[in-house]
Amino acid sequence: MAGRAGGGPRPPVSQGDDWAARLLDHLRPGARDPRRVVAWLAGAVAGTVCLQDADGILLAGTRIPLDAGLVTDVVAGRISAAAVQDGDRHLRLVAVRAPDTRPAATGLLAVARAAPFDRRAAEIVTHTAGVVELLLRERELTAAGHRLRRAAADLRLAILQLLMVEDTVSARRVAAGLWPGLLDTDSACVYIVEGRPAERDGLAEDCLDVTRGQALVVRCPAMDGHVIVLSPAPATADRLRSLVDGRPGTFLGGSVQQSLAQTATAYGQAVSALAVARFRPDQAAVYAERTHPERLMDPGALHAWSSTVLRPLDTLPHHTRAELLATTRLGLEFTAVSAAKVLGVSRNTVRARMDRVETLLGADFSDLTVRATAHLALNTQAALTDDVAGTVPQPTGVRLYDLLASPALRTWARDLLDRLIRDGRDLRGTLRAWIAAGGNAERAAQDLGVHAQTVREHVRGAEPVLERQLLAAGTDLYEVVLAHLVLGDLAVPTLLGPNPGQPDSPVHG
């Protein structure tokens, strides 16, 4: 056996033919594949070639029986290459190392052939090992880059999930190490950029580029075509608008400025705005661009009423209460499955938390009027800062009926639902029956004496007229439900009928 220790200079390349040029050709972009290099080497030296990693796993070529001790010496770095004759076989073994590095090899290139290795064949093997080293190193760096980007994406998602449950302290702590200063703010806007699911990775990279490190960019875990962007920077809105401008099938919805603790509310606003953006020529919309019913209610009465509605949860530990409220807000805004993906928990956990809130509030979330009422109370409380809380009067028996009696609110509701009259179909009557049936098209169809598909078509037809999503639960639908309640088209629901059998349900006289 002949061996060459250490990592000394490679022997000079012979100029007798153009094998070196053909070998270097494998370093061109698009041609960098160790398997192709190994196949080329086998043909160049008329032999069998095997490329394996340090653990003996075959990476390319054909498995060659090798002496275990010799392989160990080469891989361990005691020798860098070896030449040996084994019966009628002539073998060359060359260590494949990463260029940085380590005495131990990351792999082994072995060549076997019937004829002895002349100078040309030996040079080809040695220089091919160098090319393979470069290609394996590139592959390793590429894989490491993918792992790093995946880890960064997972961290961004974790930060968003912490913000969704109002854990701003932990969110800031996680973000500080990788994105210093990003969450050193009291408020931010949430944007959702929607595109084709197959193009989302590229869209997310574009969002990262245009926001220039001033935003938290997350691939939405619930909706395959959505990219969520949270940013305190005012310039982010214009940069994202320029991104979607003239880009077919791409839309932008944005929230108003919200405190970090209200990220879940801002997310719901962005989803609502996204529905409007789909009907806009510029493909973008911001939630503040339309009037919302809660803004037309007396603030003091609204806060007093919401405090009364949610008072049964006040007996719970603070962290439990916050967890239940945040989960229920998302569960009312989206499906349990989507809420679970956003929060990073199981759908059973979401449902269990919502069931507990239902029991505490004496509510039935299968009733859309109850869902709309609970949604109003939850979002009112989420927007209640400590400064405002000090000015809110103590609960004095304010009823939902009192809140809905505002003349301004009646004008808003009438203007909204009167849009449906312009359509030749009875969209308003169908929509009212559909809401009364809990959003169930079959039950509404039975009440109306029509086909269920007619109900679905009418509800779907009302969406562009009202500029609101109705078939997907959320703020848009609940605003339309409130409009029906304001005008007396639907009965005002009653909350606060707790089940006395629930262990943490307070007793009411």
Image: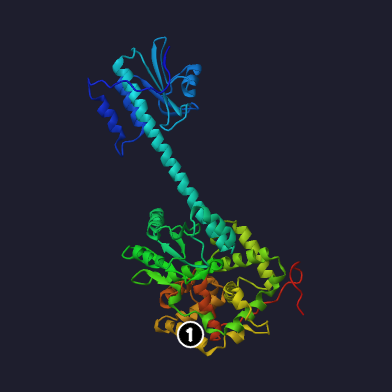
Q: Quadrant of the N terminus?
A: top left
Tell me if residue 377 can be seen: no
> Residue 35 is drawn in which quadrant?
top left
Give the amino acid type for the residue marked by disc 1 in the picture: Trp
In the image, residue 295 sits, relative to residue 124, either above or below, namely below
Q: Position of residue 210 (x, y in %)?
A: 37, 59
In the image, residue 207 sits, relative to residue 100, either above or below, namely below
> Residue 365 is drawn in which quadrant?
bottom right
How many numbered marks, from 0 up?
A: 1
Instruction: Give the SS element for disc 1.
Output: helix
Residue that badge 1 annotates: 412
Tell me if residue 407 can be seen: yes
Would residue 23 be found to the left or right of residue 477 on screen?
A: left
Q: Residue at x 70, y 71 (%)?
A: 314
Q: Residue at x 70, y 73 (%)?
A: 312
Q: Residue at x 59, y 64 (%)?
A: 166
Query: Farthest residue toward the top?
Result: 87
For this rendering, which residue is in front, 177 or 37? Answer: 177
> Residue 464 is drawn in which quadrant?
bottom left
In the image, residue 197 sits, relative to residue 431, either above or below, namely above
For this rendering, which residue is in front, 202 or 428? Answer: 202
Q: Position of residue 356 (x, y in %)?
A: 68, 66
Q: Position of residue 484 (x, y in %)?
A: 53, 82
In the image, residue 56 sits, relative to residue 495, either above or below, namely above
Q: Quadrant of the C terminus?
A: bottom right
Q: Position of residue 325 (x, y in %)?
A: 62, 67
For this rendering, which residue is in front, 456 or 482? Answer: 482
Judging from the image, the colouring scheme is rainbow
